[in-house]
Amino acid sequence: MFDMRVVGGVVVTPQGRARLNIGVRNGSISYVGPELPESRKSVDADGLMVLPGGVDTHVHLMDPSATDREDFPTGTRAAAQAGVTSIIEHTHAGPVRTVKDLEDKREHLRGRSNVDFGLAAHAWPGYTEHVRELWQAGIAFFKVFTCTTHGVPGHTAANLLTHLTAAADVGAPNLIHCEDESLTESAETILKNADRADNGILPEWRNRSAEVIATAVVSALTRRCNAEVTIAHVSHPEVLRYIEAERARGARLSAEGCPQYFLLREEEIHEHGSLRKFTPPARARHGRDEDKMWEALRDGKLSFISSDHAPSTLQQKGCGSIWETQFGLPGIDTTFPALINAVAEEQLAWEDLATVYAEAPARKYGLWPRKGAIRPGFDADLALIDPTEEWTLSNDDVASKAGWSPYSGRTFKGRVVKTVLRGEVIAEDGKARDALTGVWLAGGGMREVGIK
């Protein structure tokens, strides 16, 4: 007797899709196949696509620091409604630099999450001695900056070499934000000396050369240190060429994509200003750029997708000049919808979606073999999708504290209608149940030292 069964849906894996039934026992998948298992509860998935719950590994929920922008209960409610069942979170306003920081944050977050979550630490110049103990305490990865952003100091090449060597020694992965600080500082000085404060300063300030140069340096150091690195939020196909070159030489490099680099255009900054202020900024200038990004995602040059959810409210985005307002966009509400719509537009296949927003990120950051697949033994984390529903996003649909989306007004085809976390329905028909049953997911280093 199963606790729950999901009946009649088209189950999607990276290898294919088939109409199958799922049996769940004690929160885990116990059966996937054609038989109709006997169970206490039944979910009718007829006409629906059944995918692994989304695994979003680049999320900023600001808790317990800048909670006026976002907190865990609200941000994870948005995740649940969107079909996301696991996240990896880090906030720059309250960085995790030591084991005590991590323990304090874990304690604060107890009973505050609607989905399961891992936590990342910040690599901080001068804190290299904390790398091993943070990894063994259960962090998912180290977030590293090459330029000072959000109050987090950037790493010089020398500092980065030190950190990557320490991380490689213990096997810890890294997510690196690539913008060369000397180039962004020089551009900022030139623009301010010219009394520029128009919206167009953003792509000139956080320019493509800064991203390309930093990516080239980071990629080379990754190979030389034999480190494991993901280049965060790759903005343009040109950036990928430098990653591919070092991959061909043996570097253990992944490349993260985010929807804003597929769906937003560079020119939009002129009209929307701070509502398009994120960094690296949107680089796409025409449909060819976007088509190349989708192609890179399909063929694996881009390894997986994350939201880089970094919200501010409309009021917060409206305070101060383009220089002063916060970087970042809300994204946890809309990443799964954007990917589902890409399937409808034939930019992706359903199998691609199961790879780039579930299996690949779960494997990269040690959530596998618990998360990221519909297989016996995995957590029963599912997103049930109506592939036929067409809907137009409005700001009212956004559950994040931000209360707005850069995609408001867009029509999407396909919608998550039910989200299941460890065998329990946590969202249905666009509304989360606020069960707050999410648990912390220990990273690979804690499991390596034998702690569950």
Image (spheres, rainbow, N blue to C red):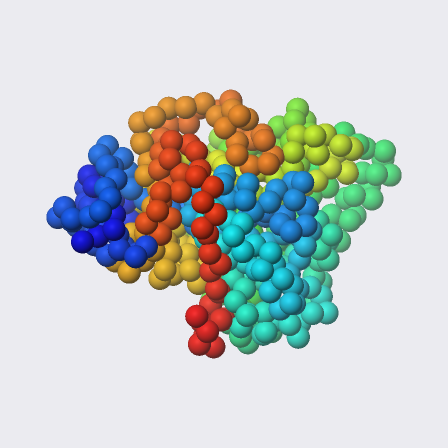
Residue 26 in percent (x, y) is at 30, 57
Q: Residue at x 52, y 52 (%)?
A: 111
Residue 372 in percent (x, y) is at 37, 53
Count of marks overlaid on the render = 0
Q: Is residue 17 left or right of residue 204?
A: left
Q: Is residue 391 left or right of residue 41?
A: right
For the C terminus, which image quadrant?
Answer: bottom left
Q: Residue at x 67, y 40 (%)?
A: 68
Residue furthest to the front: 40
Residue 126 shows in this picture: yes
Q: Is residue 206 left or right of residue 170?
A: right
Q: Nearer the viewer, residue 25 or 138?
A: 25
Q: Nearer the viewer, residue 30 or 331?
A: 30
Q: Is residue 115 above or below residue 251?
A: above
Q: Is residue 255 left or right of residue 40?
A: right
Residue 162 in percent (x, y) is at 66, 72
Q: Nearer the viewer, residue 443 or 357?
A: 443
Residue 343 in percent (x, y) is at 35, 35
Q: Residue at x 54, y 56 (%)?
A: 110
Q: Is residue 296 above or below residue 315?
A: below
Residue 143 shows in this picture: no
Q: Is residue 16 above or below residue 415?
A: below
Q: Residue at x 66, y 75 (%)?
A: 129
Q: Quadrant of the rendered structure where residue 385 is?
A: top left
Q: Nearer the viewer, residue 9 or 233?
A: 9
